Image: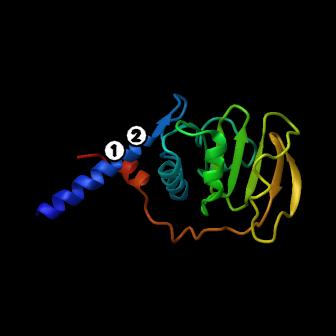
Amino acid sequence: MPRLAIVTFLFLASIVSAQAQVSFQPQVRGLGCLRPQTRAMITQLTAQIGPIQITSTCGGKHAHNSQHYRGNAIDFRPQAVSSSRAVAALRGMSIVGGIGHYGSGVVHADVGERQLVWGGQSRGARMRFASPYKARGGFARVARHSHGYVRHAGLQPRYDEHAVQPDLLSAMFNSPLP
Protein backbone atom coordinates (compact mmCIF):
# COMPACT_ATOMS: atom_id res chain seq x y z
CA MET A 1 0.00 0.00 0.00
CA PRO A 2 2.73 2.57 0.81
CA ARG A 3 4.37 1.86 -2.56
CA LEU A 4 1.10 2.69 -4.37
CA ALA A 5 0.81 5.94 -2.42
CA ILE A 6 4.36 6.93 -3.41
CA VAL A 7 3.75 6.15 -7.08
CA THR A 8 0.48 8.10 -7.02
CA PHE A 9 2.17 11.06 -5.35
CA LEU A 10 4.99 11.08 -7.92
CA PHE A 11 2.51 10.87 -10.80
CA LEU A 12 0.45 13.77 -9.44
CA ALA A 13 3.61 15.79 -8.81
CA SER A 14 4.71 15.27 -12.42
CA ILE A 15 1.29 16.43 -13.67
CA VAL A 16 1.51 19.60 -11.59
CA SER A 17 5.07 20.14 -12.83
CA ALA A 18 4.07 19.75 -16.49
CA GLN A 19 1.06 22.00 -15.97
CA ALA A 20 3.35 24.72 -14.59
CA GLN A 21 5.47 24.50 -17.77
CA VAL A 22 2.65 25.51 -20.16
CA SER A 23 0.69 28.76 -20.11
CA PHE A 24 -1.70 30.16 -22.68
CA GLN A 25 -2.55 33.50 -24.22
CA PRO A 26 -6.23 34.38 -23.66
CA GLN A 27 -7.36 33.37 -27.17
CA VAL A 28 -6.03 29.81 -26.72
CA ARG A 29 -8.56 27.48 -25.13
CA GLY A 30 -6.28 24.66 -24.04
CA LEU A 31 -4.83 21.60 -25.72
CA GLY A 32 -8.01 19.59 -26.28
CA CYS A 33 -7.92 20.02 -30.06
CA LEU A 34 -4.33 18.75 -30.42
CA ARG A 35 -3.37 15.25 -31.53
CA PRO A 36 -1.46 12.98 -29.12
CA GLN A 37 1.76 13.42 -31.15
CA THR A 38 1.54 17.19 -30.74
CA ARG A 39 1.01 16.85 -27.00
CA ALA A 40 3.99 14.49 -26.81
CA MET A 41 6.05 17.12 -28.64
CA ILE A 42 5.01 19.75 -26.07
CA THR A 43 6.00 17.44 -23.21
CA GLN A 44 9.43 16.77 -24.75
CA LEU A 45 9.96 20.43 -25.54
CA THR A 46 9.13 21.74 -22.06
CA ALA A 47 11.40 19.09 -20.55
CA GLN A 48 14.26 20.51 -22.64
CA ILE A 49 13.69 24.27 -22.60
CA GLY A 50 11.41 24.93 -19.64
CA PRO A 51 8.14 26.87 -19.63
CA ILE A 52 6.41 28.03 -22.80
CA GLN A 53 3.44 30.27 -23.48
CA ILE A 54 1.25 28.86 -26.25
CA THR A 55 -0.05 31.59 -28.56
CA SER A 56 -1.93 29.47 -31.10
CA THR A 57 -3.25 25.92 -31.47
CA CYS A 58 -6.18 24.85 -33.68
CA GLY A 59 -8.44 27.88 -33.62
CA GLY A 60 -8.02 31.25 -35.25
CA LYS A 61 -6.83 32.13 -38.74
CA HIS A 62 -3.98 30.24 -40.34
CA ALA A 63 -2.64 29.63 -43.83
CA HIS A 64 -4.62 27.37 -46.16
CA ASN A 65 -3.78 23.71 -45.37
CA SER A 66 -2.12 24.74 -42.11
CA GLN A 67 -1.02 22.00 -39.72
CA HIS A 68 -2.86 24.00 -37.03
CA TYR A 69 -6.23 22.99 -38.54
CA ARG A 70 -5.26 19.32 -38.23
CA GLY A 71 -4.24 19.60 -34.57
CA ASN A 72 -0.61 19.03 -35.54
CA ALA A 73 0.87 22.44 -34.69
CA ILE A 74 1.38 25.07 -32.03
CA ASP A 75 2.86 28.53 -31.97
CA PHE A 76 4.57 29.40 -28.71
CA ARG A 77 6.85 31.87 -26.99
CA PRO A 78 9.65 30.33 -24.88
CA GLN A 79 9.72 31.79 -21.37
CA ALA A 80 13.14 30.70 -20.06
CA VAL A 81 15.32 30.60 -23.20
CA SER A 82 15.68 32.53 -26.44
CA SER A 83 13.60 31.61 -29.46
CA SER A 84 16.75 30.51 -31.30
CA ARG A 85 17.53 28.12 -28.45
CA ALA A 86 13.98 26.75 -28.67
CA VAL A 87 14.43 26.23 -32.42
CA ALA A 88 17.69 24.38 -31.78
CA ALA A 89 15.92 22.09 -29.29
CA LEU A 90 13.11 21.42 -31.78
CA ARG A 91 15.60 20.51 -34.49
CA GLY A 92 16.94 17.76 -32.27
CA MET A 93 13.50 16.19 -31.71
CA SER A 94 12.62 13.38 -34.12
CA ILE A 95 8.85 13.89 -33.79
CA VAL A 96 9.01 17.48 -35.11
CA GLY A 97 8.17 17.97 -38.78
CA GLY A 98 7.98 21.75 -39.20
CA ILE A 99 9.77 24.56 -37.43
CA GLY A 100 9.16 28.24 -37.97
CA HIS A 101 10.46 31.39 -36.36
CA TYR A 102 8.54 34.64 -36.46
CA GLY A 103 10.44 37.86 -35.99
CA SER A 104 8.42 38.58 -32.83
CA GLY A 105 10.06 35.73 -30.92
CA VAL A 106 7.16 33.34 -31.48
CA VAL A 107 8.12 29.86 -32.68
CA HIS A 108 6.01 27.47 -34.77
CA ALA A 109 6.38 23.71 -34.29
CA ASP A 110 4.39 20.92 -35.90
CA VAL A 111 4.39 17.16 -36.22
CA GLY A 112 3.41 17.19 -39.90
CA GLU A 113 4.80 14.70 -42.38
CA ARG A 114 7.14 17.08 -44.20
CA GLN A 115 10.23 18.59 -42.69
CA LEU A 116 9.93 22.34 -43.10
CA VAL A 117 12.07 25.06 -41.65
CA TRP A 118 11.41 28.74 -42.18
CA GLY A 119 12.17 31.97 -40.46
CA GLY A 120 12.64 35.66 -40.82
CA GLN A 121 11.07 38.93 -39.92
CA SER A 122 9.60 39.81 -43.31
CA ARG A 123 8.91 38.45 -46.77
CA GLY A 124 12.05 37.28 -48.45
CA ALA A 125 14.08 37.06 -45.26
CA ARG A 126 16.83 34.46 -45.52
CA MET A 127 16.84 31.27 -43.53
CA ARG A 128 18.52 31.51 -40.17
CA PHE A 129 17.95 27.99 -38.90
CA ALA A 130 17.54 25.73 -41.93
CA SER A 131 21.08 25.02 -43.11
CA PRO A 132 21.97 22.24 -40.63
CA TYR A 133 18.43 20.83 -40.63
CA LYS A 134 18.57 18.17 -43.34
CA ALA A 135 16.37 15.15 -43.77
CA ARG A 136 16.73 11.96 -45.75
CA GLY A 137 17.91 12.84 -49.23
CA GLY A 138 18.75 16.46 -48.45
CA PHE A 139 16.71 19.47 -49.51
CA ALA A 140 14.50 18.71 -52.49
CA ARG A 141 13.41 22.22 -53.42
CA VAL A 142 13.15 25.74 -52.11
CA ALA A 143 9.78 27.46 -52.29
CA ARG A 144 8.39 30.78 -51.18
CA HIS A 145 6.38 31.01 -47.96
CA SER A 146 4.58 33.99 -46.50
CA HIS A 147 7.28 34.32 -43.82
CA GLY A 148 10.41 33.74 -45.88
CA TYR A 149 11.83 30.77 -47.67
CA VAL A 150 10.65 27.26 -46.93
CA ARG A 151 12.89 24.28 -47.40
CA HIS A 152 11.14 21.02 -48.14
CA ALA A 153 12.83 17.74 -47.41
CA GLY A 154 11.75 14.11 -47.17
CA LEU A 155 8.03 13.72 -47.68
CA GLN A 156 7.57 10.54 -45.66
CA PRO A 157 6.35 10.55 -42.05
CA ARG A 158 9.15 10.27 -39.52
CA TYR A 159 7.04 8.67 -36.83
CA ASP A 160 4.62 5.80 -36.56
CA GLU A 161 1.42 7.30 -35.26
CA HIS A 162 0.30 3.90 -33.99
CA ALA A 163 3.44 3.62 -31.84
CA VAL A 164 2.96 6.91 -29.98
CA GLN A 165 2.45 6.31 -26.28
CA PRO A 166 -0.02 8.31 -24.20
CA ASP A 167 1.79 11.30 -22.82
CA LEU A 168 1.67 13.27 -19.63
CA LEU A 169 -0.22 16.24 -21.08
CA SER A 170 -3.04 14.10 -22.46
CA ALA A 171 -3.38 12.47 -19.05
CA MET A 172 -3.29 15.89 -17.43
CA PHE A 173 -5.93 17.50 -19.66
CA ASN A 174 -8.22 14.52 -20.23
CA SER A 175 -8.64 13.26 -16.67
CA PRO A 176 -9.69 15.21 -13.59
CA LEU A 177 -7.37 15.51 -10.64
CA PRO A 178 -8.58 13.74 -7.49
- The answer to whether residue 68 is visible is no
- The image quarter containing residue 103 is top right
User: How many numbered callouts?
Assistant: 2
Task: Tell me where residue 50 appears, x and y as whole percent.
Answer: 49, 44
Crowd class of label 2 (few under 14; some 14 to 19; many from 20; radius 10 Å): few
Residue extending farthest to the top is: 26
Q: Is residue 166 above or below residue 77?
A: below
Task: Tell me where residue 88 appears, x and y as whole percent.
Answer: 65, 51
- Colouring rule applied to residues: rainbow
The residues tagged by marks 2 and 1 sit, at their Cα atoms, a distance apart of 6 Å
Q: Is residue 158 above or below residue 65?
A: below
Task: Tell me where residue 136 appears, x and y as whole percent.
Answer: 76, 71
Left or right, residue 21 beside residue 96: left
Crowd class of label 1 (few under 14; some 14 to 19; many from 20; radius 10 Å): few
Residue extending farthest to the left is: 1
Is 164 in front, or is 19? Answer: 19
- The image quarter containing residue 61 is top right
Q: Is residue 115 above or below residue 106?
A: below
Q: Secondary structure at mark 2?
A: helix
- Residue with the mark numbered 2: 20
Q: Secondary structure at mark 1?
A: helix
Check disc 1 and give the amino acid type.
Answer: Val
Is 60 in front, or is 156? Answer: 156
Q: Please report the residue visible at 88 percent of the width from the left and 60 percent of the height from the top.
A: 141
Q: Please report the residue visible at 61 percent of the width from the left and 46 percent of the height from the top.
A: 86
- The answer to whether residue 19 is visible is yes
- Residue with the mark numbered 1: 16
Q: Please report the residue visible at 62 percent of the width from the left and 39 percent of the height from the top.
A: 82
Left or right, residue 55 beside residue 2: right
